[in-house]
Structures are given as C-alpha cells and as structure tokens.
C-alpha cells in the first residue's frame, strides 16, 4: 500500500489551520480492503488525527530565477513567473524572526509559504 498520508500532506490536502483535526480519511472516498488473516478481505476505514501547531516566521527567500520586465525608473519588476530557492526548516527557525501575530507586522508579507514538520509519528 502506498504511503498515501504522506502524499496527501505533500499536496496540501490535510488541514494547516492550528488546532485538532480528528478522523480525516486517508484515502478519501476510496474503498480500502485488508486481509483479515483468514484469507478474507474486509473493508476498513483508515483515518488520521492531527494536532496542528502554527509557528510564524518572517524572512527572505532567495529568487533563483525570474522572467519579466523591469521598470528602469522605479526598479520594480512585473512578472508572472519566478522560482524561489529551497527552504530549510532548521535555517528558518535559527535565522528568521519569529512572529506571534501576523496582524502585528508593519506591512503584510508578499508571500506565505506553508511547511509541515511531523512530530510524534506513531504516538
């Protein structure tokens, strides 16, 4: 059986809002059968329960590649395509400024990146 819960997490299909999220179907509406040990297949419902905690950090991501037009007077760029550098969670925790409330910032972030870090697997 593929590791579907990791796939759904990677695709952002699990909730990212802080709080407890109970009994989320791992395979959605797909019917799942397991061998019951007596050579019979039985239908099972597989779910996951999540406790989501949110940590907010403010920092800069490197733009590795950008396609667009630069305004020579203002220095601004008009683009519909850019590629950001990789994001290392340990580097973010160590070097970026932790923010308690996004509304307390002097200006709102241009881009919000959501990352998942999994703790307590199997507990």
Image (cartoon, helix red, strand yellow):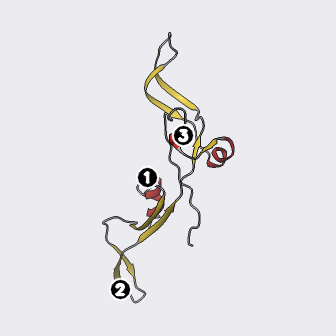
Q: Nearer the viewer, residue 109 or 1?
A: 109
Q: Is residue 107 above or below residue 38?
A: above
Q: Nearer the viewer, residue 43 or 73?
A: 73
Image check: 12 left or right of 28?
right
User: Within the image, what quadrant is residue 62 found in?
Assistant: top right
Which residue is pictured at 59% across the width and 67% down the height? 120
Question: Which residue lies under the disc numbered 3?
Answer: 104
Q: Are marks 3 and 2 in contact (CB under 8 Å)?
A: no
Q: What is the secondary structure assignment of the residue under circle 3?
A: helix
Residue 70, compared with residue 15, is above or below; it is above
Quadrant location of the N terminus?
bottom left
Quadrant placement of the C terminus: bottom right
Labels 1 and 3 touching (C-beta < 8 A): no
36 sits left or right of 105 in the view: left
Q: Which residue is mark 1?
A: 11
Distance from label 2 to label 1 (Cα)? Answer: 33 Å
Pick whichever, 115 or 29, lies toward us.
Answer: 115
Identity of the residue furthest to the front in this view: 104
Helix, strand or loop under label 2: loop
Q: Is residue 121 above or below residue 62?
A: below
Task: Give the labeled residue for mark 2.
Answer: 40
Badge 2 vs badge 1, beta-carbon distance below 8 Å:
no
Tag 1, which secondary structure?
loop
Q: Earlier in the sequence, mark 2 or mark 1?
A: 1
Left-right relation of 106 to 14: right
């Amino acid at each position: 059986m593929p590791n579907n819960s990791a796939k759904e997490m990677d695709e952002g299909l699990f909730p990212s809002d802080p709080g407890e999220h109970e009994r989320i179907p791992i395979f959605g509406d797909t019917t799942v059968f397991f061998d019951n040990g007596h050579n019979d297949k039985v239908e099972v419902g597989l779910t996951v329960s999540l406790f989501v905690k949110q940590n907010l950090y403010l920092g800069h991501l490197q733009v590795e590649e950008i396609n667009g037009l630069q305004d020579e007077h203002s220095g601004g760029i008009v683009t519909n395509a850019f590629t950001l550098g990789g994001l290392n969670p340990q580097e973010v925790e160590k070097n970026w400024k932790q923010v308690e409330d996004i509304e307390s910032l002097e200006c709102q972030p241009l881009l919000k990146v959501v990352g998942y870090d999994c703790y307590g697997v199997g507990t």
